Image (cartoon, rainbow, N blue to C red):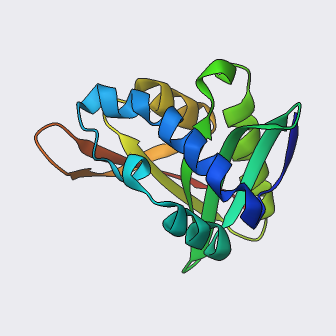
Amino acid sequence: MIVQPAEPGDAAEILALQKLAYRSEAAIYDDWSIPPLTQTLIEMQADLARQTCLKATIAGRIAGSVRAHVEDDTCYVGRLIVHPDFQGRGIGTRLMNEIEDAFRGVARFELFTGHRSERNLYLYRKLGYEPCRRERISDALTLVYLAKTRSP
């Protein structure tokens, strides 16, 4: 597996992978209108232009990706995705470690996931993230925000 910065030309492949990876999240909440599933290619291209985006490739195929950006001393991590065929192989962990390394001077990281997304919550806690707040979106969904602080 190779982890490296995504390039503008990767936008369509990452978007297709994102839509595949987020199907399981949509099923958990029975909501097929979540932003990762409705994002357009133009929006994805804009994300890649304004955020740091890493991709994990295996045999030339993008198997995972993660994005992050910094605002006010906090690195906001989002859209960690791993192809369903490659889950459970450490790709998500590697991408999270690499995105944190890409922001070495930042002491605080924050991300969010849904309250019923047990696999995500387990992974983030395993990586040292702790719940810091919750935001009720609907009767079916509460976002759990998790943060991790480290010495810069």
- Residue 150 in the image: above or below residue 43: above
Is residue 37 visible in this depiction of the protein?
Answer: yes
- Residue 98 in the image: above or below residue 102: above
To which quarter of the image does residue 124 belong?
top right
44 with respect to 6 (left or right): left
Residue appearing at x 27%, y 46% in the figure: 33
Residue 26: x and y in percent read 33, 34
Residue appearing at x 49%, y 41% in the figure: 19
The answer to which of 76 and 51 lies nearer the viewer is: 51
Residue appearing at x 31%, y 26% in the figure: 27
The answer to which of 52 and 26 lies nearer the viewer is: 26
Placement of the N terminus among the 4 image quadrants: top right
Residue 57: x and y in percent read 82, 38
Placement of the C terminus among the 4 image quadrants: bottom right
54 with respect to 133 (left or right): right
Residue 117: x and y in percent read 39, 30
